[in-house]
Image: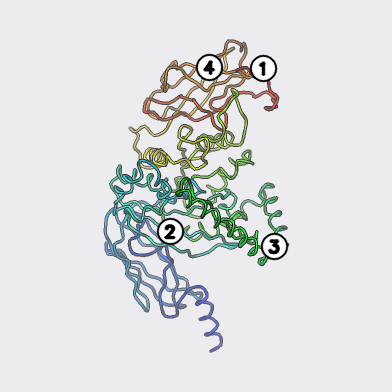
Amino acid sequence: MIKKTILMGTLLAAAGVLCGDVKLPAIFNSDMVIQRETAAPVWGWADPEEKVIVTGSWGEKADTVAGKDGKWRVKLNTPKAGGPFVITIQGKNKIELKSVLSGDVWICSGQSNMQMPMTLLRDTAFYAREIANANYPEIRIYQLKRNPAQTPLDDTVGKWEPCDSFTVSKFSAAGYFFGRKLYQELKIPIGLINTSWSSTCIEAWTPLDKQLADPIVKNTKDRLDKSAETYNPEVAKKKFEEAKAVWQKKVEEWKAVGSKGPSPRGPALLQNPQQSFDYPGNLYNGMIAPLVSFAVKGAIWYQGESNAGRADNYRTQLERMITCWRDAWGQADLPFYFVQLPNYMKPWAAPVEDGGWPILREAFMKTAMEMPNTGMAITIDIGEENNIHPINKQDVGDRLARVALYKTYGKKDAVWTGPIAQSCKFDGEKAIVSFENGGAPLAVKGEKLQGFALVDEDGLVVRADAKITAENIVEVTAPTIKKAVAVYYAWANNPTGVNLINKAGLPASPFRFGTIPKINFKEKKTAN
């Protein structure tokens, strides 16, 4: 019996449980935001069969008894938006979470453009103003530590902090601008949880067991498993030290010229491929799974760049990931809003230029159109030719928030999106495209619409003329096209000059319609 007791204590200690003490996961601490007006799960660890009472200062209470494994969980009815409140957890010891606000909590996830902190905007003209004005004590931010894991974790590292000029400098710029817009419009506390990692693929953010039937995912897993067989940590460390020396020399040279431009990027220690951030499921296990019991309002997502090389499968992967997250949270209608990738790379030269980025944009658009409670921020006008991390994150956050305000918060009188093509009718030489105009009539930024192309039945691709004929209709024609079979708009990695907007100034999403002739885009017939 003594040995059994000692063994149980050892196991609980390994899980982070101090014998005799109630313990909470890191997501619960003072200054947090708890999701308003719901039965919010509160959970943690204690001694086996220890009684735990959770009390909210607004008058709600819940109690339970820890299981034989020391785990406990209750659901606490939360108040209307407001605070501050105190949450007390009483077991053999007592924990008090002070200055707790009740409001709406949003997950902010993705890769580098979501991870990109405010401080990386410091060379911009607006940075000093934005940082000085970023004092919003009713916006609370939580930065999750980056942590890939091969099995789902039940805790993470992080801390809730009130948003101010110091704390926000380290936080996601896109996430902050999204949350600020919500706070300014709704006047309720907003909680933002940033769980993002640069250069990561969507497969890493999706549970492994839910995607193994996908041959692309299985091939990735098999390749990394095979690479892991020859992984040598000593060799990896040696290569890292060599790369580090080269990097330090580049930093010295950078400083010698006045620290102009971005600082040289440091090397990363090569991890066991099975433990890496790009192994399927690893970021879900380490950076989503610890959060899934925490009550939230919804999620925003900015990712896709790392999947551009296999863009044809992205729509399937995105819809799979959203479904998995909704299942994990037990919310079939969990709002999920994402950023359609902006313009990037060399400006286009042909009327249509196939590639991973336009296909990814289409995947986002189709998902937003067909999957309930999803939506898309269109950013085709705010990218940069030579920068995969465009600095304009204010508009990214603003446009994501517009979608949320319309779809989640019922602000039906607001302009919530740029034009999104809904359908197309081909009538001889014409393509007649109908739009969801987002709450404001179609408009042109400039004198003449640019960026349209038509394709005839022989595969001839030409730049086309376009005109707005109604508040949600555009007609597309070209002198050389007698029978149009397909129409494109802004179909390229970087479709500079495209200018279909609505009267609120929000840009139209790229799109294509029609029976696309079998064209080799490297050899297709084009007319400028």
Say which element carries label 2. loop
CA gap between label 1 and label 2 equals 54 Å
- Observer-side mark, 4 or 2, equals 4
Point 43% across, 30% down: residue:
418
Q: Earlier in the sequence, mark 4 or mark 2?
A: 2
Give the crowd class for mark 1: few <14, some 14-19, many >=20 residues within 10 Å: some
Residue under numbered circle 4: 476
Q: Quadrant of the N terminus?
A: bottom right
Residue under numbered circle 2: 294
Q: Which mark is residue 231?
A: 3
Point 70% across, 50% down: residue:
219
Callouts 2 and 3 close, C-beta under 8 Å: no
Q: Quadrant of the C terminus?
A: top right
Q: Which mark is residue 457?
A: 1
The three-letter code of the residue at mark 4 reads: Val
Residue furthest bottom in the image? 2
Q: Earlier in the sequence, mark 4 or mark 3?
A: 3
Q: Earlier in the sequence, mark 3 or mark 1?
A: 3
- Say above or below: 507 vs 255: above
